[in-house]
Image (spheres, rainbow, N blue to C red):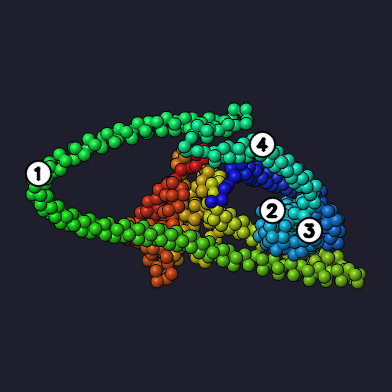
Amino acid sequence: MKTVSISRKLLTRVLSVYFILTFIVTCGQIVAEYFNTKSHITNELLTLEKTFTGSLTRAVWELNTQQAIDIAEGLIAIPMIQGISVTDENGQVIAQLGRTTEKSKTQHNDNALAGHLLISSLTDGLFGHSFPLIFEFSGRTTRVGTVELLSSNGVIFDRIEIGIYFLIGNAVIKTAFLVFLFSLAFQRLLTTPLQELTEQIKRFDIDDPELSKLNSMSYEHNELSILEDAYNNLIDELLIYKEQLTKAQNEVIKTNNQLDEQNLLLEQEVARKTSSLSSSMLELQRQKQELLQHQEKLQAENNHRKKTESTLIQTNKDLKSSVLELKKTQDLLLNTEKMASLGSLSAEISHEINTPIGVSITSTSYLADILQKITLEVEEDKLSKRRFLEFSQNANHSIELLLSNLSRASDLIASFKQVAVDQTSNKLRKITLAKYIDEIIQSLEPKLKKTQHKININCSEDIIIYTHAGAIAQVLTNLIINSIIHGFDNIEHGQINITVTKQAKLIHLHYSDDGNGIAKEKLPLLFEPFYTTKASSGGTGLGTHIIYNLITDTLNGSIDAHSDEGNGLSYDIKFLDMAGE
């Protein structure tokens, strides 16, 4: 068998641990230096943003493309900046210099409205941030474009290159010195003494153990001297045991003679006992056979029980798996219903916005035509006072149309945006309940304007609560849509009443309509999933089930329904203001 050196093995393990620790620490220092330098560069990018954002904003607002390009070229000349992109409010590129990444472009287009956006691309080695260009005019702020500043990992490595070489050189020098020091110490303190002890142990003589004792040349009291003393003590004990063994052998010979005499007596006694034991053995054999038969029966019964237990366990697992699948399917259907409702509302809002935008486009086109005509008359010196007053009146009328229609479109978008964000985020926020209900009703205006139904709201303006606004928006949206589709089926003029009161932290919302109602025997099924009276028309039966889950789970409240067929349907909803929780 090949001899393995303990000192070499120990030295290898100690140095391996040191190498690993040195490598980890050095890598950690390099990574820390990398991220520290990256943080400094990011801060420098933010400083550049504060320095140039004013001039860029003014250039983009005034459509001065050349000035924006000149500013971008000045920025790209800074070694730290590897890429710059300036786009207008529609995402059209004004100036794009240096390196860019597809990933950063996608993030910029999707999130420019959200403010500053950090950008990081591992594949391209680029990082930076984008920020919007905000122009203030007459107390109003307008986003006129977006700027994206990029730096790269190469800039970082250029800055920390010398530091990395220093760290690596320092680690190599310390490691080389430690290897030399450990090798010298292990050779002197362990390898050489062990070789001397090994040579002496190999000269061990079993016939004369006294001459085989170890004589060490070292005068230090260490583990090797302890091993030497233990070995010499073992030799002393071996001599004692050798003497004791000689005495024991003599006693064994004497005892064997006595045993021979006793064996003769025992043989006679055994012969006498054998005859009596034969009959007992036959009886024991019979009882053993009966026990074996009984054991086989018990084994068969036990196997049957194990099979039954295994079947029950597998059945239980299958049932649990089925329940989980049903739960996942139910959650998926609920989310699908939410998105379908929001998508339908979005389509109707989009259609509704087309009208004011179309009027605005027509007014703008008309204004451009008369402005071109008046400009031509000015150039030809044919402009009269009456013609100028006529142009002024038409221009003012066109501007009034533009302002009113654009304001209408802006209100529709703002209402839908707030309601849509609340329904998808499900975050807690503070709302004025009466104002928020008005926003919900306004977001449903495209659906309500197709009908002659009326919604009456009775809610105090001073009810301000902290709650899941999205849950309230979805509850009221589903209730109103259910009234329009189901309650007011074949009814032209319907009335919906929403009354809200607050006592301490308890909010009581009473919703009612004067529609068709629902039969009392079907009322207990109202909140059950997939129960609908419009299955043939595409109804899913999840609307009231979603309402129930939102009120009981998200709002931690309660809901009760009351109805008589032909006399409308009403809901009593109660939940708590979550302020201070």
Q: Quadrant of residue 484?
A: bottom left
Mark 3, mark 2: which one is toward the viewer?
3
Secondary structure beneath dot 3 equals strand
Q: Which residue is mark 1?
A: 272
Q: Is residue 234 visible?
A: yes
Mark 1 and mark 2 lie on one chain; the one further toward the N terminus is: 2
Q: Is residue 330 visible?
A: no
Q: Closer to us: mark 1 or mark 2?
A: 1
Q: Amino acid at mark 2?
A: Leu
User: Mark 4 vs mark 2: which is more N-terminal?
Assistant: 2
Q: Nearer the viewer, residue 254 or 223?
A: 254
Q: Amino acid at mark 4?
A: Arg
Cα gap from disc 4 to disc 2, whole angstroms: 63 Å
| SS class, disc 1 | helix
Residue at left 26%, top 57%?
306
| Residue 251 falls left or right of residue 552 | left
Query: Which residue is labeled 3 in the image?
Result: 83
Q: Which residue is mark 4?
A: 188
* x then y, percent, for residue 416: 58, 58
Q: Are marks 3 and 1 in contact (CB under 8 Å)?
A: no
Tell me residue 575's x, y (percent): 44, 45
169 or 415: which is nearer to us?
169
Q: Nearer the viewer, residue 580 or 403?
A: 580
**Dots 4 and 3: beta carbons under 8 Å?**
no
Q: Is residue 41 left or right of residue 241?
A: right
Vertical position of residue 231 compared to residue 25: above or below: above
For discs 3 and 1, the disc positioned in front in the rendered view: 1
